[in-house]
């Protein structure tokens, strides 16, 4: 990027070609007031607060949209500009309901801050008392149009990052208001994903989240900690505001990132609400159908005794959550598998993960990384949804798919047993009657695409075997052939048939879907640290239900439901120890001993996310009372069991993101490798 | 090929259609047939002649006699007298207002004699639904020559040298604008015609599109060739159904003739044209909002830079020009840039079409060379002020323009002089006002329009025009305060400088110019609570002259709010508190005892 | 040096601004050596006397408040609009989003805890409600604006100190608040 030099307010400023005046000013610590501008969203120049005077140009230019040019001389704080900005602020205040004293956002409002910064101590224009609607139809998000300054940030983030484009403007001029879905109230919208991104970017008290209203202004919070959301494999970065020891608010971190800081419906509300769930505060021992409090000594003693018996009879096991951090998983593996010699160690949803591992294995053997960072969907021009339901499995992935399709004009193909979750956006919907046909479809497509030319016989065979019409198959092949960078989103249910996963990667290779960091495949691997679990606690083969066990140590974070298979195995075990932060049903009821555990906001560590990087969690609020960090509990347990805890190896998860061999060297494999 | 001894041209423009010209046309058809004159007399439907005040307009050739306000009942007389006996029908000819002299030939009518019709060349002469008539009048000759013997750069250079400037209001040199687009990087380029014509009362573009659509098409073909575009859009407001229909017919005929489509005239040049209808928003006449509308987005303007010439429709380089600008282009290429540059003033070349309306005798369309004075337009072509009232001001440029007063009557009409005087050329709307027009009301009228049409994107326009309008409403209803004038002026200046697009940047113009030239009227409204022009009804009071009142009681009987009291012995009196100023008492009083002031 | 005469009134107000003034705590002793409060809602005065500084707290909502505001302007040299209600109209303006009649009915007839079967809205011998609640400067010229709900007592003290030094203060951004 070529460097350019300009003068702003008499200061020589350096910037890069392509920057706007505002970007150059900000990188040189010069403040220009803005209201509608938000880094990461397309600037529209509508609030006019950032207007600056540029020498030799008779017109006033908005700094947020005007490209900076070599030699420009810019003035941002002239007498005239100050006067005009003050006039515009007074106009805004007079136009709608901007009386601060009864607004939930007062003190946290960009409009208020700007008016005070410009010394607005009175409004010379008559107040207009318009009486727009206060839309309280949505159960979590409230939209009071009387407070709106029409900065259009909510429209932009909903269109550009969430991809839903639920919000837009209706009517004209002074009567214009934000509206959902061509004229509905927000609560009645069909397209709203309730991610709350609109509320996060709203500079005034127009869009507020009922959950957080009056809980504490951002300024009043005692601490602001950055961490990672534990609820899905994307692992969005979050910012948690803490006030007097409780979580006041959770936000996505930045609008400039690919996910736009949108969080999702799960992240934004489940996380803070979980801090109010009932906690297991001390060790508890079962007595009949009740639990009684016990000391750590008593509880640990009992656990050790039962474990000892079961271990001698080789009927012991441990199940851990794949929402655990790398460090926690490594600790478990080190203690149970290495120090205690327990063969049966596994994670929840183990079979799903094993399916993925098996499906990817032939490519790992080639030294190829068979998947790519999730945000690369945004670079794609053809997205293939393979039995995934992104709105459920990883909502931010759904956003990527919508944004790439709507704004990037990518084509969207659905190859699955269910209709496409993106009804109006899908170009070809190839629904098969059952997963078996779906696997055959992927296999067939990979075979045809990997060959030279389009073999008509093969197409016809695939059509017959799968029940998908020939037209659609030709359409799919055509779309894939035209695409420069197709991506393949794999749903979790594909793992039932590992060969389907191998076929998917084969298909990606056949279509030359190569990114810098791997093959263009995005696996929706269930949990936030499934990738980390694969290298540490995941068992090579499933042992659930094969033998009735006498002892099971279960660690659950209590944030997502445990899978059926695991619960069934747990309920069949004679003695169960459950370590969990919350009274999570039905798991907790199956326990003989309950041990407290730190909740997601009380621990730090790392997650290996499908965004292609290892992300760092921070402790938001330190654990209190009897609730102790995991390492201290496990040390205690080892002491009781008479073993040394052992030093866990450096969690080997970093290797998940290393590509030894360039993706372009990948070779398709025969499914025979996977079938046995 | 048939030869006719006479042609009867009936105007079928929207203005004359509203006064019944379609039935006149049918009446002629029947009468000519009845008299057996079909092989001798040709009946032609044309576009707008321009003198809309006198519509329906009928012109008979070879004499070139113009008949005014022709009704279907007049047709037999015209056929009998003029077509059969060769005698002009005197009573239907145009007569000058001051001397009441009949003017037999339309060329001599001052309305026309002072005009120099270039863009309106064919309007009123040809049947717009027949491409053959356009070609017969040298249509597509310029294009054919350009395509076959000129390079695109040469075409562009001709337009540059001609000095043509944008006729939509901006006045930007057209050749230069084309050059920006030509030089922009990219293979795909678009040509756009702005036919949104949102100014209230403006109908220049409508007349050109209805009367001579091929002029626009040929202009766009030349523009596309010069710039290197292969696709174009005509964005026409939906309120012009006749224009849209005529464009459709013209485009279909062009396609048949091979003048639109692939490989035109067997060269490598291809051009496809689409018509996109507007949906009732004045703001969509603004370039970037217009392009957003074509793209299917909400019609809101976008900040510039980037300019449409580099990043326009769907991000591709695009060139937008107004209908009248396009209509001028074929003439420039056919007659040469020198010819065009010889008309007009030094900096403003060529002619301009004005929609002359308001308190003049001859309202209608006129096309005059740049440099013509306002006096000539208003008093000679316009025939002077209606009802012999006194000239007060002229509003040029519609809701974006400004007022000029008596001292400016000898101002030559060109971009520079108008801007220096505080007005703008605009798209050509020219409203004449007399002593009965309240200038504060004029400012309020235009501001009502722009405030209603504001898209709402930027703060100054959205909130500023609303507050300005409220102040004007206060003033015209007698509740204004002297401080309001300062607030109004400051607000107007801020909105003008800070708005995002042309709508907001020019909306304060009527306010600013009326404040500049008619401040005393504003002050009278505030200080004296009186409207000097006696137009603002809230400031008027109706009083009954006791001397003249004959106590008949008619006023009281007809008063809708029963605020007049009196009886057979007592003169009637109006209760000013309850009076709603409807004026009924003044109308019904047989003795002129009621006066308003 | 004679003390500066100060008059204060509260109009359509909650009196919170006056309470906030008392929050200057012990500094009030020092202040009272320089100012003389000749009229205030908490002392027994019937007519507003002449004063140098007139502090108006609250918005103008009824006829009486309008009269008081005009009296203050007549009798005082410098008028200070004190608090959000006086400066912007404040919380009283919530009723402006509807009409006067609806507001009266809501208060006296329709609100959940009211028992008023006769639907009587008081109107005799009481000041009439104005069509809209308005900031003070709609009717009366204001010299100093101090926004806040209530303004910080520090800011109030600063305003008085500036006035005592003979200046007409404009509250700077650091000292300003709207809630």
Image: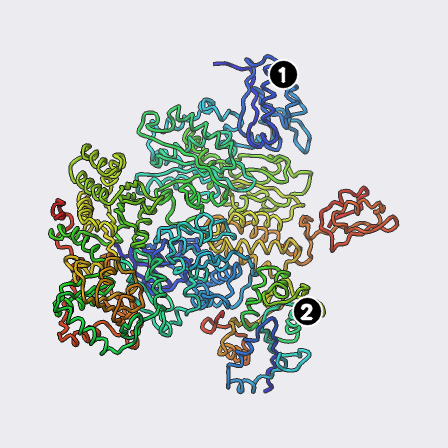
Q: Is residue A349 visible?
A: yes
How many angstroms separate mark 2 from mark 1 (CA)? 86 Å
Q: Report x, y in % for residue B495.
A: 50, 55
Q: In what element is the residue under mark 2?
A: loop
**Mark 2 touches mark 1? (CB < 8 Å):** no
Q: Which residue is mark 2?
A: C127
| Residue at x-position 53% and y-position 55% | B492
Using the rendered image of the protein, determine whether residue A61 is visible from the camera's viewpoint.
no
Check the image and report above or below for A451 versus A362: above
Rendered location of residue B89, percent (x, y) = 66, 21
Classify mark 1: helix, strand or loop. loop
Q: In the figure, B212 relative to A154: above or below? A: above
Image-quadrant location for residue B558: top right
Of A38 and B31, nearer the camera is A38
Please tell me which residue lies in front, A567 or B290. A567
Q: Chain of mark 1?
A: B
Residue that extends furthest to the right in the rendered view of this protein: B569
Residue pushed farthest front? A288
Subunit of mark 2? C
Image x and y of residue A150, in percent: 46, 56
* Residue of label 1: B86
Nearest to viewer (mark 2 / mark 1) = 2
Horizontal side, residue B116 vs residue B581: left or right: left
The residue depicted at 56 percent of the width and 23 percent of the height is B9
CA neighbours of label 2 inside 10 A, class few (<14), some (14 to 19), many (20+): some
Closer to the camera in the image, B325 or A381: A381
The x and y percentages for residue C51 are 63, 79
Quarter placement of the N terminus of chain A: bottom left
Q: Are marks 2 and 1 on the same chain?
A: no
Mark 1, Cα crowd under 10 Å, few <14 / some 14-19 / many 20+, is few
Numbered circle sitting on residue B490: none
């Amino acid at each position: 990027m070529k460097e350019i030099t300009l003068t702003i307010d008499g200061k020589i400023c350096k910037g890069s070609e392509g920057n706007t005046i505002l970007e150059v000013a900000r990188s040189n610590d010069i403040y220009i007031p803005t209201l509608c501008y938000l880094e990461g969203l397309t600037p529209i120049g509508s609030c006019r607060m950032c207007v600056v005077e540029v020498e030799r140009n008779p017109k006033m230019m908005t700094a947020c949209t005007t490209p900076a040019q070599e030699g420009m001389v810019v003035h941002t704080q002239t007498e005239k500009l100050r006067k005009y900005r003050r006039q515009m602020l007074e106009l805004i205040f007079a136009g709608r309901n901007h009386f601060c004293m009864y607004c939930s956002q007062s003190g946290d409002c960009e409009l208020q801050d700007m008016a005070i910064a410009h010394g607005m101590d009175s409004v010379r224009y008559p107040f207009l008392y318009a009486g727009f609607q206060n839309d309280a139809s949505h159960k979590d998000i409230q939209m009071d149009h009387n407070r709106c300054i029409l900065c259009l940030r909510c429209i932009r983030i909903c269109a550009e990052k969430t991809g839903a484009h639920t919000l837009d403007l209706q009517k004209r001029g002074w009567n214009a208001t934000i509206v959902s879905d061509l004229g509905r109230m927000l609560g009645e919208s069909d397209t709203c994903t309730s991610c709350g991104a609109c509320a996060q970017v709203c500079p005034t008290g127009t869009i507020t989240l009922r959950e957080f209203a009056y809980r504490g202004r951002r300024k009043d919070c005692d601490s602001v900690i950055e961490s990672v959301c534990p609820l899905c494999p994307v692992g969005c970065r979050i910012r948690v505001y803490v006030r007097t020891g409780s979580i006041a608010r959770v936000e996505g971190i930045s609008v400039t990132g690919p996910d736009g800081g949108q969080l999702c419906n799960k992240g934004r509300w489940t996380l803070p609400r979980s801090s109010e769930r009932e906690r297991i505060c001390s060790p508890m021992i079962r007595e009949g159908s009740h639990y009684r409090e016990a000391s750590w000594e008593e509880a640990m003693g009992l656990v050790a005794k039962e474990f000892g018996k079961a271990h001698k009879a080789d009927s012991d096991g441990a199940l851990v959550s794949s929402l655990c951090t790398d460090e926690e998983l490594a600790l478990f593996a080190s203690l149970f598998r290495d120090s205690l010699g327990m063969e049966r160690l596994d994670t929840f949803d183990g079979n799903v993960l094993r399916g993925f591992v098996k499906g990817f294995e032939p490519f790992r053997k080639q030294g190829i990384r068979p998947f790519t960072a999730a945000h690369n969907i945004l670079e794609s021009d053809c997205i293939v949804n393979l039995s995934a339901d992104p709105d459920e499995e990883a909502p931010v992935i759904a956003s990527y798919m919508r944004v790439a399709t709507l704004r990037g004009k990518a084509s969207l193909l659905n190859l699955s047993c269910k209709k496409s979750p993106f009804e109006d956006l899908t170009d070809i919907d190839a629904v098969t009657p059952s997963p078996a046909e779906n696997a055959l479809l992927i296999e067939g497509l990979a075979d045809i695409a990997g060959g030279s030319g389009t073999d008509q016989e093969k197409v016809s065979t695939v059509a017959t075997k799968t029940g998908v019409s020939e037209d659609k198959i030709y359409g799919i092949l055509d779309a894939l052939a035209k695409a420069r960078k197709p991506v393949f989103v794999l749903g979790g249910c594909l793992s039932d048939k590992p060969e389907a996963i191998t076929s998917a990667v084969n298909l990606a290779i056949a279509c030359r879907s190569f990114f810098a960091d791997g093959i263009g495949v995005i696996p929706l691997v269930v949990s936030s640290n499934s990738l980390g679990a694969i290298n540490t606690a995941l068992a090579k083969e499933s042992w659930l239900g094969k033998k009735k066990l006498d002892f099971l140590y279960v660690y659950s974070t209590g944030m997502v439901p445990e899978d059926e298979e695991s619960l069934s195995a747990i309920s069949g075990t004679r003695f169960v120890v459950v370590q969990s932060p919350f009274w999570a049903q039905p798991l907790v009821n199956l326990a003989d001993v309950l041990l407290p555990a730190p909740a997601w906001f009380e621990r730090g560590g790392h997650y290996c996310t499908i965004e292609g990087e290892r992300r760092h969690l921070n402790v938001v609020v330190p654990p209190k009372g009897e609730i102790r960090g995991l390492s201290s509990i496990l040390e205690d347990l080892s002491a009781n069991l008479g073993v040394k805890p052992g030093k866990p190896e450096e969690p080997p998860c970093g290797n998940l993101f290393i590509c030894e061999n360039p993706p372009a060297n990948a070779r398709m494999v025969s499914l025979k490798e996977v079938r046995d | 090929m048939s030869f006719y001894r006479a042609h009867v041209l009936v105007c079928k423009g929207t203005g004359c259609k509203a006064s019944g010209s379609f039935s006149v046309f049918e009446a002629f058809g029947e009468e000519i047939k009845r008299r057996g004159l079909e092989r001798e007399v040709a009946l032609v439907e044309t576009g707008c002649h321009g003198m809309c005040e006198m519509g329906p307009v009928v012109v008979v050739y070879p004499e070139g006699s113009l008949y005014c306000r022709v009704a279907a009942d007049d047709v037999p007389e015209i056929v009998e007298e003029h077509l059969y006996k060769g005698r002009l029908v005197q009573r239907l000819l145009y007569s000058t207002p001051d001397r009441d002299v009949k003017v037999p030939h339309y060329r001599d009518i001052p309305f026309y004699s002072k005009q120099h019709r270039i863009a309106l060349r064919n309007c009123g002469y040809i049947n717009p639904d027949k491409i053959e008539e356009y070609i017969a009048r040298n249509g597509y000759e310029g294009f054919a020559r350009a395509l076959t013997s000129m390079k695109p750069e040469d075409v562009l250079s001709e337009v540059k040298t001609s000095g043509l400037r944008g006729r939509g209001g901006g006045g930007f040199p057209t050749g230069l604008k084309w050059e920006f687009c030509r030089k922009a990087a990219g293979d795909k380029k678009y040509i756009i015609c702005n036919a949104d014509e949102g100014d209230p009362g403006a109908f220049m573009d409508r007349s050109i599109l209805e009367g001579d659509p091929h002029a626009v098409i040929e202009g766009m073909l030349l523009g596309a060739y010069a710039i290197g575009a292969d696709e174009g859009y005509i964005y026409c407001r939906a309120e012009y159904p006749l224009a849209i229909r005529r464009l459709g017919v013209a485009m279909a005929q062009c396609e048949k003739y091979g003048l639109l489509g692939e490989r035109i005239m067997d060269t490598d040049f291809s051009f496809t044209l689409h018509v996109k209808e507007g949906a009732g928003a004045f703001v969509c006449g603004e370039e970037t909002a217009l392009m957003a509308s074509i793209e299917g987005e909400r019609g809101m303007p976008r900040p510039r830079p980037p300019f449409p010439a580099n990043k326009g429709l769907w991000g591709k380089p695009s060139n937008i020009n107004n209908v009248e600008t396009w209509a001028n282009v074929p003439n420039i290429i056919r007659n040469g840039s020198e010819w065009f540059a010889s008309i007009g003033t030094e900096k403003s070349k060529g002619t301009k079409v004005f929609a002359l309306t308001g308190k003049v005798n001859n309202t209608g369309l006129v096309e005059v060379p740049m440099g013509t004075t306002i006096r000539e337009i208003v008093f000679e072509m316009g025939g002077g002020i209606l009802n012999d009232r006194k000239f007060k001001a002229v509003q040029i440029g519609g809701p974006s323009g400004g007022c000029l007063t008596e001292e400016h009557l000898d101002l030559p009409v060109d971009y520079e002089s108008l801007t220096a005087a505080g007005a703008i050329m605009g798209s050509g709307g020219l409203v004449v006002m007399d002593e009965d027009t309240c200038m504060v009301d004029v400012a309020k009228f235009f501001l009502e329009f722009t405030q209603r049409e504001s898209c709402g994107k930027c703060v100054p326009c959205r909130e500023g025009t609303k507050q300005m309008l409220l102040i004007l409403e206060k003033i015209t209803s007698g509740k204004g305060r002297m401080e309001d004038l300062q607030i109004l002026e400051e607000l107007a200046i801020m909105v003008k400088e800070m708005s995002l697009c042309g709508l907001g940047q020019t909306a304060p113009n009527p306010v600013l110019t009326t404040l500049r030239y008619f401040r005393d009227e504003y002050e009278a409204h505030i200080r004296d609570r009186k409207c000097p022009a006696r137009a603002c009804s809230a400031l008027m009071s109706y009083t009954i002259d006791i001397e003249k009142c004959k106590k008949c009681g008619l006023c009281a009987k007809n008063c809708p709010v029963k605020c007049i009291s009196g009886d057979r012995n007592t003169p009637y009196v109006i209760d000013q508190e309850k009076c709603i100023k409807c004026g009924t008492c003044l109308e019904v009083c047989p003795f002129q005892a009621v006066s308003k002031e | 040096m004679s003390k500066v005469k100060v008059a204060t009134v509260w109009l359509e107000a909650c009196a919170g601004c006056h309470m906030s003034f008392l929050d200057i705590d012990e500094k009030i002793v020092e202040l009272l050596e320089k100012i003389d409060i000749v009229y205030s809602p908490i002392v027994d005065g019937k007519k507003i006397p002449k004063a140098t500084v007139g502090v108006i707290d609250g918005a103008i909502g009824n006829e009486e408040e309008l009269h008081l505001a005009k009296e203050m302007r007549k009798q005082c040299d410098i008028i200070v609009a004190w608090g959000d209600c006086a400066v912007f109209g404040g919380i009283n303006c919530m009723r402006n989003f509807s009409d006067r009649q609806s507001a009266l009915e809501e208060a006296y007839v329709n609100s959940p805890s009211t028992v008023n079967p006769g639907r009587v809205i008081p109107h005799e011998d009481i000041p009439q409600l104005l069509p809209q609640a308005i900031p003070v400067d709609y009717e009366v010229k204001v010299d100093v604006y101090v926004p806040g709900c209530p303004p910080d007592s520090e800011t109030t003290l600063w305003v008085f100190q500036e006035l005592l030094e003979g200046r007409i203060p404009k509250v700077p951004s650091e000292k300003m608040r709207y809630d």
